[in-house]
Amino acid sequence: MKARSSFLIVANRLPVDRVVGADGAAAWRRSPGGLVTAIAPVMQRREGAWLGWHGAPGEEVKPFDHDGMHLVPVPLSAAEVELYYEGFSNATIWPLYHDVVATPIYSRVLWDAYRAVNDRFARAAAEVADENAVVWIQDYQLQLVPAMLRKLRPDLRIGFFLHIPFPPVELFWQLPWRREIVEGLLGADLVGFQRPGGAANFVRLCRRLLGLQHHRNEVELDGRRIRAEAFPISVDFSELDTLVREPSIVARAKEIRSELGEPEHMLLGVDRLDYTKGIGQRLKAFSELLADGAVKPGEAVFVQIATPSRERVEEYRRLRNSIELQVGRINGEHSQLGHQPVQYLHQSYNRRELAALYFAADVMVVTPLRDGMNLVAKEYIACRHDLRGSLVLSEFAGAADELKQAFSVNPYDVEGMKRAMLTAMRATPHELSRRMRSMRRRVATYNVDRWAGEFLAALEGG
Ligand code: GDG
């Protein structure tokens, strides 16, 4: 095992979860998700290392190898998880960057913890990176790391990718530590965003806040040029496309429809239970369709998977209560014996079950109020080789830039959402296949390998 690596990923979490086997022994298992899938081959080719928290508060874990990747755990205390992760990352930055759809908490205690943890990550990265190594830092939890790391190791090539939206200047301006965050990001050579709009917001901010010169998407600071550019993330198209063709998945999809009572229309939502995802808005639209009589009881079922998320953050607890109240009301008013119009599942599922759900659903309803990309929308497309199924997609998701053949909605417009859901339910097979074919072409070409490849080519070539 090499002590230092020439390629380094730095992320809040390591790409593994600790699981306890039947014999009671603990082992590591690769976490699901596109990021790991996309990056693992690059890691293996380049003897890369991945730095991140291992998930157990207050525990020190030694570096170890897993799945051909060298993993370097960064410890976090229970208090840091609360202040840096649940606090500054998820109660300050997350709502601020998602158009303030919930009120951000501005607290100096949270900020201090964020800075301290970012400093720990930067020092750990400086230790592990080989001379002139390439370091790729991920996401909003680590925005100070680029500048902290550059100070310690000016020889490195540093990239940063933000998975969530980057807000307009007028909103970002609220942040008491706005200058520190922007200067933190500017430690990178390349700052990647999901959408061109995010990159443009960032460049504008550099000019307005720091008075920096810029030429198109390049900002100048201390004689260095920092590039801001969009790299829309994607999914592993061929993995999903292969999975969903397995006979057991096809059979499970059939079974799901039969368990739901063979409805004419199955609508589906799959989200982390998060206030940015517009779950309440889509359920309201659906319930009004039932109340208006546009959808007859028994004709349609709305399956909403709401994966438990950030349950210790106050705003998320409130959201859960409000969604559960809403589901109870809708079902109370519109159920018949043996049939409930909304099937709400506050649970996590494995990939196979998700693939079967995607394959079973007639209408995939993705209506975030703001979303960096939204991989669920792309996963649905990757699972529909049968060219059936329609996608209702919010204009406020990054995915809307690419999936132009979706039924586009403004999630704040209830009437518009009702119309789009009805249109999606009533579209002819011919119409659906035309739309699906074009969206599949896009996701198949711009898959997650291409995302990682293009980012790294820009980082190393530029
Ligand atoms: C952030 C940004 C950006 C969901 N439930 C289960 C499950 N999932 C999987 C989905 C999908 C992923 O989680 C969710 O990804 P999204 O992109 O939809 O949303 P965020 O979690 O908010 O992700 C987002 C993304 O980062 C990547 O850059 O697109 O905008 O907010 O893959 O399938 N997976 C399993 N069980 C579940 O119950 N196994």
Image (cartoon, helix red, strand yellow):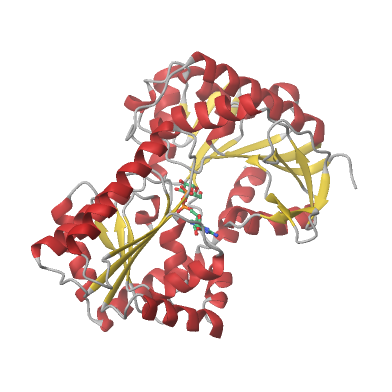
Find residue 291 and report its horizontal and vertical position in percent. Answer: 12, 61
Displayed quadrant of residue 286: bottom left
Is 132 displayed left or right of 370 in the figure?
right
Q: Position of residue 435 (x, y in %)?
A: 31, 73
Q: Using the rendered view, name the quadrant where residue 63 is placed.
A: top right
The residue at the point 28 percent across, 54 percent down is: 327
Asked whether the viewer can see residue 212, the reply is yes
Instruction: Identify whether 399 is placed above or below 334.
Output: above
- The answer to whether residue 404 is above or below residue 224 is below
- Which quadrant is the C terminus positioned in? top right
Q: Which of the 4 quarters of the picture holds residue 153? A: top right
* Residue farthest front in this picture: 337
Q: Is residue 360 above or below residue 305?
A: below
Image coordinates of residue 285 in percent, x first then y, are 20, 56
Residue toward you, 407 or 411: 411
Q: Who's the residue at 28% across and 47% down the image?
A: 325
Residue sitting at the far left: 292
Q: Nearer the viewer, residue 331 or 390?
A: 331
Residue 201 shows in this picture: no
The residue drawn where x is 88% and y is 40% is: 3
Residue at the (24%, 71%) spot, across then down: 337
